[in-house]
Image (tube, helix red, strand yellow):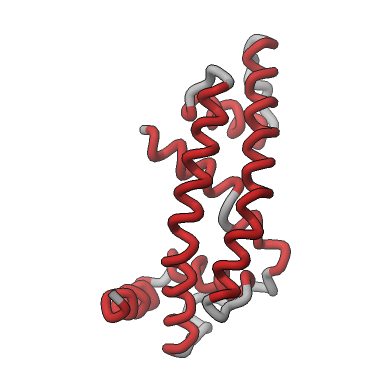
Protein backbone atom coordinates (compact mmCIF):
# COMPACT_ATOMS: atom_id res chain seq x y z
CA UNK A 1 0.00 0.00 0.00
CA UNK A 2 2.83 2.37 0.77
CA UNK A 3 4.11 1.88 -2.78
CA UNK A 4 0.75 2.98 -4.22
CA UNK A 5 0.97 6.15 -2.19
CA UNK A 6 4.48 6.83 -3.39
CA UNK A 7 3.40 6.28 -6.97
CA UNK A 8 0.51 8.70 -6.65
CA UNK A 9 2.76 11.35 -5.10
CA UNK A 10 5.39 10.74 -7.73
CA UNK A 11 2.89 10.98 -10.53
CA UNK A 12 1.52 14.18 -9.08
CA UNK A 13 4.69 16.08 -8.43
CA UNK A 14 7.78 14.65 -10.05
CA UNK A 15 7.28 13.20 -13.47
CA UNK A 16 5.15 14.59 -16.22
CA UNK A 17 3.61 17.51 -14.35
CA UNK A 18 7.02 19.00 -13.63
CA UNK A 19 8.02 18.81 -17.28
CA UNK A 20 4.70 18.78 -19.17
CA UNK A 21 4.72 22.52 -19.78
CA UNK A 22 7.47 21.92 -22.32
CA UNK A 23 5.68 19.13 -24.22
CA UNK A 24 4.62 19.60 -27.83
CA UNK A 25 1.28 18.11 -28.91
CA UNK A 26 1.78 14.39 -28.47
CA UNK A 27 1.72 12.04 -31.40
CA UNK A 28 0.05 8.69 -31.13
CA UNK A 29 2.43 6.01 -29.94
CA UNK A 30 1.64 4.16 -33.18
CA UNK A 31 2.74 7.14 -35.29
CA UNK A 32 6.01 7.88 -33.49
CA UNK A 33 9.09 5.94 -34.57
CA UNK A 34 12.12 6.61 -32.41
CA UNK A 35 15.69 6.00 -33.51
CA UNK A 36 17.89 3.63 -31.55
CA UNK A 37 19.99 6.64 -30.54
CA UNK A 38 16.94 8.41 -29.10
CA UNK A 39 15.96 5.32 -27.16
CA UNK A 40 19.51 4.81 -25.90
CA UNK A 41 19.50 8.40 -24.64
CA UNK A 42 16.11 7.78 -23.06
CA UNK A 43 17.37 4.68 -21.23
CA UNK A 44 20.47 6.54 -20.07
CA UNK A 45 18.32 9.42 -18.82
CA UNK A 46 15.87 7.07 -17.10
CA UNK A 47 18.72 5.32 -15.31
CA UNK A 48 19.92 8.71 -14.03
CA UNK A 49 16.43 9.98 -13.15
CA UNK A 50 15.22 6.92 -11.23
CA UNK A 51 17.52 7.31 -8.20
CA UNK A 52 16.75 11.04 -8.07
CA UNK A 53 13.02 10.29 -8.08
CA UNK A 54 13.42 7.61 -5.44
CA UNK A 55 15.29 10.04 -3.18
CA UNK A 56 12.64 12.71 -3.68
CA UNK A 57 9.85 10.20 -2.98
CA UNK A 58 11.47 9.26 0.32
CA UNK A 59 11.65 12.92 1.26
CA UNK A 60 7.99 13.37 0.35
CA UNK A 61 6.98 10.41 2.50
CA UNK A 62 8.98 11.84 5.39
CA UNK A 63 7.28 15.21 4.89
CA UNK A 64 3.84 13.62 5.06
CA UNK A 65 4.63 11.45 8.05
CA UNK A 66 6.19 14.40 9.92
CA UNK A 67 2.74 16.02 9.72
CA UNK A 68 1.19 12.95 11.39
CA UNK A 69 -0.52 11.81 8.19
CA UNK A 70 -0.18 8.53 6.34
CA UNK A 71 0.63 8.56 2.65
CA UNK A 72 -2.70 6.86 2.00
CA UNK A 73 -4.62 9.53 3.93
CA UNK A 74 -2.71 12.31 2.20
CA UNK A 75 -3.52 10.81 -1.19
CA UNK A 76 -7.19 10.38 -0.28
CA UNK A 77 -7.49 14.06 0.63
CA UNK A 78 -5.54 15.10 -2.47
CA UNK A 79 -7.72 12.99 -4.74
CA UNK A 80 -10.91 14.34 -3.18
CA UNK A 81 -9.72 17.92 -3.72
CA UNK A 82 -8.75 17.23 -7.32
CA UNK A 83 -12.21 15.82 -7.98
CA UNK A 84 -13.76 18.95 -6.51
CA UNK A 85 -15.10 17.11 -3.50
CA UNK A 86 -15.01 18.34 0.07
CA UNK A 87 -13.14 15.63 1.98
CA UNK A 88 -14.97 16.65 5.20
CA UNK A 89 -12.01 16.27 7.53
CA UNK A 90 -11.19 17.98 10.80
CA UNK A 91 -9.55 21.41 10.55
CA UNK A 92 -6.39 20.20 12.27
CA UNK A 93 -5.97 17.39 9.74
CA UNK A 94 -6.59 19.79 6.85
CA UNK A 95 -3.88 22.09 8.20
CA UNK A 96 -1.51 19.11 8.39
CA UNK A 97 -2.43 18.18 4.81
CA UNK A 98 -1.84 21.72 3.53
CA UNK A 99 1.48 21.93 5.35
CA UNK A 100 2.56 18.57 3.89
CA UNK A 101 1.43 19.64 0.42
CA UNK A 102 3.52 22.82 0.66
CA UNK A 103 6.51 20.76 1.77
CA UNK A 104 6.04 18.34 -1.12
CA UNK A 105 5.85 21.22 -3.58
CA UNK A 106 9.11 22.55 -2.16
CA UNK A 107 10.71 19.12 -2.56
CA UNK A 108 9.42 18.96 -6.13
CA UNK A 109 11.02 22.30 -6.90
CA UNK A 110 14.26 21.19 -5.27
CA UNK A 111 14.45 18.05 -7.40
CA UNK A 112 13.10 19.46 -10.67
CA UNK A 113 16.44 20.96 -11.68
CA UNK A 114 18.26 17.74 -10.78
CA UNK A 115 15.90 15.74 -12.98
CA UNK A 116 16.16 18.16 -15.90
CA UNK A 117 19.96 18.20 -15.61
CA UNK A 118 20.06 14.39 -15.63
CA UNK A 119 17.83 14.23 -18.70
CA UNK A 120 19.83 16.86 -20.55
CA UNK A 121 23.07 15.15 -19.52
CA UNK A 122 21.88 12.09 -21.40
CA UNK A 123 21.44 14.20 -24.53
CA UNK A 124 17.67 14.60 -24.37
CA UNK A 125 15.22 17.41 -23.85
CA UNK A 126 12.74 17.04 -21.01
CA UNK A 127 9.93 17.16 -23.58
CA UNK A 128 11.36 14.25 -25.58
CA UNK A 129 11.96 12.27 -22.40
CA UNK A 130 8.36 12.72 -21.30
CA UNK A 131 7.03 11.93 -24.77
CA UNK A 132 8.96 8.68 -24.94
CA UNK A 133 7.95 7.82 -21.35
CA UNK A 134 4.27 8.37 -22.15
CA UNK A 135 4.53 6.28 -25.33
CA UNK A 136 6.53 3.60 -23.51
CA UNK A 137 3.70 3.20 -21.01
CA UNK A 138 1.12 2.77 -23.80
CA UNK A 139 2.96 0.87 -26.52
CA UNK A 140 4.04 -2.77 -25.97
CA UNK A 141 6.30 -2.71 -29.05
CA UNK A 142 8.13 0.34 -27.75
CA UNK A 143 8.40 -1.32 -24.33
CA UNK A 144 10.11 -4.31 -25.93
CA UNK A 145 12.57 -2.08 -27.81
CA UNK A 146 13.41 0.01 -24.74
CA UNK A 147 13.70 -3.05 -22.50
CA UNK A 148 16.05 -4.67 -25.02
CA UNK A 149 18.24 -1.56 -25.12
CA UNK A 150 18.26 -1.45 -21.32
CA UNK A 151 19.42 -5.09 -21.18
CA UNK A 152 22.20 -4.36 -23.70
CA UNK A 153 23.37 -1.31 -21.72
CA UNK A 154 23.54 -3.32 -18.47
Residue at the farthest right position: 21
Can you say which quadrant of the picture contains the N terminus?
Answer: top left
Number of on-image labels: 0
Against 13, residue 50 (above or below) is below
Horizontal and vertical percent for residue 15?
A: 56, 56
Which residue lies at the image location 47% right of the left edge and 28% below the top edge?
A: 72
Against 52, residue 60 (above or below) is above
Q: Nearer the viewer, residue 36 or 49?
A: 49
Can you say which quadrant of the picture contains the C terminus?
Answer: bottom left
Which residue lies at the image location 66% right of the left edge and 62% below the top edge?
A: 20
Which residue lies at the image location 29% right of the left edge and 78% below the top edge?
A: 148
Horizontal and vertical percent for residue 64?
A: 55, 28
Q: Nearer the viewer, residue 52 or 38?
A: 52
* Residue 12 in the figure: left or right of residue 48: right
* Occupied quadrant, residue 19: bottom right
* Residue 106 in the figure: left or right of residue 4: right
Horizontal and vertical percent for residue 149?
A: 33, 80
Q: Nearer the viewer, residue 48 or 10?
A: 48
Horizontal and vertical percent for residue 107?
A: 63, 43
Which residue lies at the image location 49% right of the left edge and 43% below the top edge?
A: 57
Amino acid sequence: MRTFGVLMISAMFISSEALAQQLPPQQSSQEQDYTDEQLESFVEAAMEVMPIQEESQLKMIEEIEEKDLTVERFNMILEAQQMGQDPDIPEEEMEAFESALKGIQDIQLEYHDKIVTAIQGAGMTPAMYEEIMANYQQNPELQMRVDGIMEEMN
